[in-house]
Amino acid sequence: MANCIRCGRKLAPFTFRKICPWCVQHEAAQRGEGDDEVQQRVIPAPWVRRESTISFTQVIFGANIAVFLAMMLASGDPLAYADPLRGFSGRVSGAFGANYGPYTLSGDWWRLITYMFVHGNLMHIGFNMWCLWDLGALCESLYGRWTYAAVYLLTGIAGGLTRLAWNPFVPSVGASGAIFGLAGALIASFYLGEFAQPRIALKPILTSLLVFAGFNLVVGNFFSEIDNACHVGGLVSGLILGALLARVAPHHDAPLQRAGVLAVVALGLVGCAFGVRQWRGTPFRIGRAMQSLSENDPNRGITQLQAIVKQQPKFVQARYALAQAYFSKGRLPEAEAEFKQVLQLQPDHTNARFQLGLVYLSEKRPEEAGSAFGELIAKDSNNGEAHYGIGLALADEGKDQAAIDEFKTAIRLNAPYSGIYYEMGQSYAKLKMNDDAIASYLKSKERDGDDADLENALADAYQAKGMTQQAQEAHSKAEQLKNVNRESNR
């Protein structure tokens, strides 16, 4: 921000003047033109100089530059970002803390702070840092270092929350939410506060701030790349915070009043975060939990799902996901209880009823499993999955011929499950129908891929037919597959 060449006061942001309006009026008064204004000091003049080795604006500026340089190095192509229009990939931005609904709303709340220091490209950070340098210096001189730091962070968080509420599926990066927050706070303070300087000295600054906010909001409506939701959230929260500071805690020597104002606003943001999380966040939290399950971290996934179910006990999707997680972990009684809860809330949930049947099979309760699958067939006789389940239940009861008939029906109905031919081969083998067993095993191998259990079953069928060489080859193949699995699991 430039200084007046006469008195050294700070000039209005984004101006090319060299002399401040205060000096212009003072020189006019010396010539006998104009009248002095009545002055009353309530909040200190923003251009008062303070002794400081380094300003908070410089700290924020340096942090943004450091993060940008680190992102350039992490991208693997640092020199490419000399082109101001090049942008970082979503992978790099996400790794450095972009505000993205599926991550933020599923527990990464720290992204509401880190996203303020992440920028998309050279032009993005260049414009933001230019605005920060002007507005930050003015805001810091008005409020003092620590109040200014709180205003910056709180309004930036407010901008991030607004982005999540408006559209959580688009990543958000940049300091512009906090910068608009500074502009809003300054507008409210200049409009509501009373300074020891005449209004003519403040009017250009206020006008400049209004033009800055209005122009950028209008331009943001025409470019989808501009995060106007974040800008609006920052500006509105800044107006509220600036008004409260100007009216409730204008003095630097009243730290408790200022701390109270900042605490109230912070609590308000916590409440807003909870509301956005309840409104937008549940599907993302479930997705994050399922991601943990797929990344071989089942305990974490189960804990996350348990928390969702505790908060929303009638949320069917969360209960179903938790039941599946229990089942995959082998916690069968808990899986059974959760699937029953799903069916109590939504009796027509066919997937839950099918999975409940599979739980019964795992618990060696084939009759109850058959009843669960039978209910599905009663509603839809062409349900291939249900016929497959009936086949499994009949096989467990030793009714292999009936099981084979059900497996054939499931195959005809294109049941999506792998292993149908293997299970049918097992039933054929029990009935000593070795040719059919071998044909089923080979079909399973062709359709679903090979594994050690399948090769061993095939070897047993070959041996039962007296095909010793083929049996030995299948056994050898099974041992090879087991060794491969051991190596991959190390």
Image (cartoon, grey):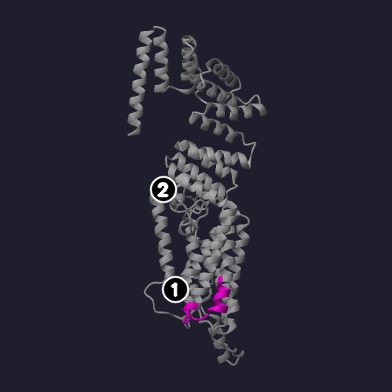
Residue nearer the viewer, 444 or 462: 462
Is the residue 214 above or below the residue 91 in the image?
below
Q: Callout 2: helix, strand or loop?
A: loop
Q: Which residues are magenta?
A: 241-256
Q: Mark 2 and 1 residues: CB-CB less than 8 Å, in contact?
A: no
Q: Nearer the viewer, residue 192 or 357?
A: 357
Closest to the camera, between mark 2 and mark 1, is 1
Q: Is residue 331 magenta?
A: no
Q: Residue at x 61, y 22 (%)?
A: 413
Q: Identify the residue under disc 2.
A: 75
Three-letter amino acid code of the residue under disc 1: Arg
**N-term mark: 2 or 1:** 2
Q: Residues within 10 Å of mark 2 (few under 14, many from 20)?
A: some
Give the quadrant of the C terminus: top left
Residue beneath label 1, please?
A: 145
Please tell me which residue lies in front, 76 or 116. 116
- Residue at the image point whose x is 60% and y is 70% from the top: 210
Q: Is residue 82 left or right of residue 30?
A: left
Report x, y in % for residue 454. 43, 20
